[in-house]
């Protein structure tokens, strides 16, 4: 069996590691308990999180034991990494709800049970900590001078860094210590923006337990244009099918930049690398075949083969002009609404295609809204029964977002 470290390296996941040779050797000799933390800042995981989930699945398939850590405690502070301002403080009830949604989603990807993956919530130990005892046992091992050299804090110094956020690294480091002591965890994984936090926990466990533990980060999911993968003009690409329907995920992946195809096939699917390289080498119009494979495989991995097939059929039907087939997102509305007519800006907002009238106005003025391939020229347009054919209209926002209205 190949070493999972080599698999992760070949597929392009790994960014930095502590003691690479030692870590690789450990992964080849024993079943290693490792963890990734997910702060519950929203009610769904995102496409960006899916890269981390893929790493966990690769590790579990290789015989290692995932610990999915829900950040019910750390979310009450919020990670300052990559943020120019302090995160919004969330209520405990909101955090608990978000964590429960994460738990449900993660159960689709990892195998939980005896001697398999486990799921824990750091609220179970962080919320019970005594401040003075914590500072005496943990805080004494952290140098403020050194912490201020880390990007997660250094980048905030000009705008102001609160002591509230300054404690985040100590909390995350304590997580590693707790998981080592209670679950034999020897490896923490995370995105490259977590390197400073991971080093904090790695050093804390080595100091207090005098044992060898390790850290590894993987590259953030970005496009060839340098933007975060899964961030669009319409918003975030979510794993929750109610927030981002499978069809929209399929279309998003189907329309990635040609330069990203091989990279995303490697990171977001389990296709063998020989096939990944073959598809990635296609040129011209042939690259569209590789994009279809990418879109299908990612949608299948997240939502299942049936949903991926329906999304693919919907996309092909739309391309061929028969948009009433497949799995295009739709909303059923009361026919009476269109007897007197509804303003296009209000309709876009009601369908969730825009968040405000000003966003809708901008899209219309830029020629970004079509109904059945007819461009909407005026923000004063009223959508009436005359616009419907066979009880349907198809609204297109930009080049990639489609939504059907049925009456």
Image: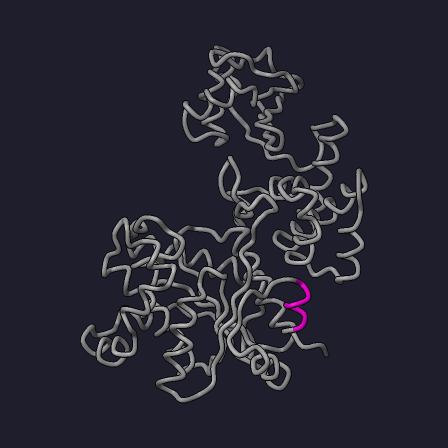
Which residue shows up at 79% across the image and 50% down it? Answer: 281
Which residue shows up at 47% across the image and 61% down it? Answer: 103
Q: Is residue 17 above or below residue 237?
A: below
Which image quadrant for residue 25? bottom right
In the displayed structure image, the side of residue 32 where residue 136 appears, left or right = left
In the foreground, 378 or 226: 226
Q: Position of residue 173 (x, y in %)?
A: 36, 72
- Residue 274 seen: yes
Q: Is residue 98 above or below residue 121?
A: above
For the record, the magenta segment spans 6-11
Q: Position of residue 246 (x, y in %)?
A: 61, 44
Which residue shows up at 38% across the image and 55% down it? Answer: 97
Dividing the image into 4 quarters, which one contains the C terminus? top right
- Residue 73 seen: no
In the foreground, 373 or 134: 134
Which residue shows up at 64% across the image and 62% down it? Answer: 12
Indicate how the structure is coloured in the image. one colour
């Amino acid at each position: 069996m190949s070493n999972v470290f080599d698999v992760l390296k070949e597929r392009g996941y790994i960014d930095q590691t502590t003691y690479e040779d030692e870590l690789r050797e450990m992964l080849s000799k024993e079943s290693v308990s490792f963890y990734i933390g997910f702060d519950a800042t929203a009610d769904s995981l995102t496409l960006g999180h899916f890269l981390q989930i893929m790493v966990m699945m690769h590790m579990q398939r290789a015989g290692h034991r995932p610990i999915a850590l829900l950040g019910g405690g750390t979310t009450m502070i919020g990670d300052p990494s990559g943020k120019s301002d302090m995160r919004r403080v969330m209520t405990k009830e909101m955090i608990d709800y978000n964590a429960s949604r994460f738990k449900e989603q993660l159960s689709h990807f990892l195998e939980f049970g005896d001697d398999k993956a486990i799921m824990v919530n750091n609220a179970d130990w962080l919320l019970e900590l005594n401040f003075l005892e914590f500072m005496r046992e943990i805080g004494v091992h952290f140098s403020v001078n050194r912490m201020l050299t880390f990007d997660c804090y250094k980048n905030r110094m000009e705008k102001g860094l609160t002591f509230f956020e300054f404690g985040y690294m100590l909390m995350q480091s304590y997580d590693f210590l707790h998981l080592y002591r209670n679950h034999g965890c020897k490896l923490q994984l995370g995105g490259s923006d977590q390197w400073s936090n991971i080093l904090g926990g790695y050093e804390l466990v080595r100091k207090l337990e005098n044992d060898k533990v390790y850290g590894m980060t993987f590259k953030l999911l970005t496009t060839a244009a340098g933007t975060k993968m899964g961030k669009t003009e319409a918003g975030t690409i979510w794993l929750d099918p109610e927030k981002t329907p499978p069809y929209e995920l399929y279309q998003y992946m189907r329309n990635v930049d040609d330069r990203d195809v091989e990279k995303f096939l490697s990171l977001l699917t389990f296709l063998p690398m020989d096939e990944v390289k073959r598809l990635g080498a296609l040129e011209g119009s042939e690259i569209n075949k590789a994009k279809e494979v990418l879109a299908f495989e990612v949608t299948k991995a997240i939502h299942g083969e049936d949903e991926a097939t329906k999304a693919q059929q919907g996309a092909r039907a739309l391309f061929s002009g028969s948009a009433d087939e497949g799995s295009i997102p739709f909303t059923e509305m009361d026919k009476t609404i269109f007897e007197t007519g509804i303003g296009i800006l209000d309709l876009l907002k009601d369908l969730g295609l825009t968040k405000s009238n000003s966003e809708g106005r901008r899209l219309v003025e830029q020629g970004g809204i079509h109904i059945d391939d007819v461009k909407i020229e005026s923000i004063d347009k009223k959508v009436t029964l005359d616009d419907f054919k066979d009880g349907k209209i198809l609204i297109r926002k930009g080049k990639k977002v489609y939504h059907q209205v049925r009456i």
